[in-house]
Image (tube, grey):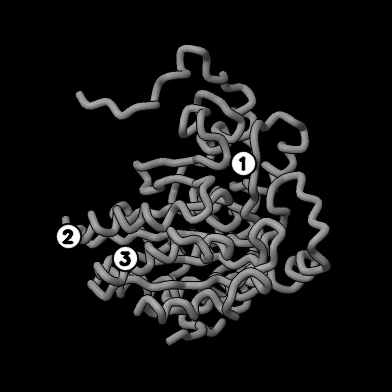
Amino acid sequence: MTETIPTDASRGLDPDGLLRAYRTMRTIRDFEERVHDEFATGDIPGFVHLYAGEEASAAGVCQHLDERDTIASTHRGHGHCIAKGVDVTGMMAEIFGRATGVCKGKGGSMHIADLSRGMLGANGIVGGGPPLVCGTALAAKQQNTGGVAVAFFGDGASNQGTTLESMNLASVWNLPAIFVAENNGYAEATASTWSVAADNIADRAAGFGMPGVIVDGFDFFAVHEAAGEAVERARAGGGPTLIEMKLTRYFGHFEGDQQTYRGDEVRNARETLDCLTRFRRRVVETGELTAERLDAVDREVAALVGGSVERARAAPAPDGADLLTDVYVRYE
């Protein structure tokens, strides 16, 4: 059965939790907008796929996770990394291809990973993440750690065999896994309304015997509520859940995408649906946070992101001696 989480869902967050959520979303937004600007200078190598507009999904899900838990991401992975606690300065250095990056400058934007934070990696393979979380979910179940594994994937990956096979396996083995379909409306330039043979990706959950939930991905509180229920169920041995986030990316599929396939949807989303604007308005109106406290976070995040760019530009690139390191696993 597919259910829809309403936007007035109970929050269950104290002021510190709300402030942390806002900081996460603001960090993702500022990071992505700065990468957008820096990429235009030609100093960032490789492809870049930005997560701006989708912040509530990563923040609302990862707010429930801790050091026991793992996530797997996509080619659009910066937001997931930040929400799971990967170092922002190390991420920026990685994107610039510097030796001080979290993957020593060898992964770049699409392959940021930090196992110490439970971040299994961004992934250039569409549908590459769900099989990975089945592995870590199985490990958590066998070792009885209480850990949960989360796979973020897009509407394009919802049609991949790896994703469907992973959901089936997670149900058969009753794994503590959560599958988060971030449906931003397009697989590259192909509309999901044309390519996905169902009105909702979450409807497919019934075929795998798991709950399916549809969420307004612009609403942090709705995301937080749905993710909290799924995480609680998984930790208690209740098995996997499929959550579909309905949202919109603010930039193109990749930096340089002319987006001729889109109309006014981005402008409309920025003006009427933006997750940061809605979050600020709600918590200020309820008196849970003040505009001044939120403004202070904005300044702190701006300084953090600006400093990360300065340090990345000043950092050394990997040298020839680094070429063959970190290629094979070494057993001492």
Q: Residue at x 52, y 19 (%)?
A: 318
Residue 108 lies, in percent from the top left, at 56, 35
Please indicate, yes or no, whether residue 209 appears anywhere in the rendered image: yes
Residue 242 lies, in percent from the top left, at 43, 72
Q: Residue at x 17, y 60 (%)?
A: 144
For discs 3 and 2, the disc positioned in front in the rendered view: 3
Q: Nearer the viewer, residue 24 or 208?
A: 208
Q: Residue at x 30, y 54 (%)?
A: 135
Disc 3 target residue: 169
At mark 3, the secondary structure is helix
| Residue that lies at the very extreme toward the left in this rendered image | 143
Q: Quadrant of residue 165?
A: bottom left
Please indicate, yes or no, whether residue 296 appears anywhere in the rendered image: no
Q: Residues within 10 Å of mark 2 (few under 14, many from 20)?
A: few
Disc 2 target residue: 144
**Mark sitting earlier along the chain (3/2):** 2
Q: Residues within 10 Å of mark 1 (few under 14, many from 20)?
A: many
Quarter of the image with the N terminus is bottom left
The span from disc 1 to disc 3 (Cα, nearest Å) is 40 Å
Residue 278 lies, in percent from the top left, at 65, 72
Q: Return the mark for residue 305.
A: 1
Q: Nearer the viewer, residue 51 or 252?
A: 252
Identify which amino acid the numbered label 3 is placed on: Leu
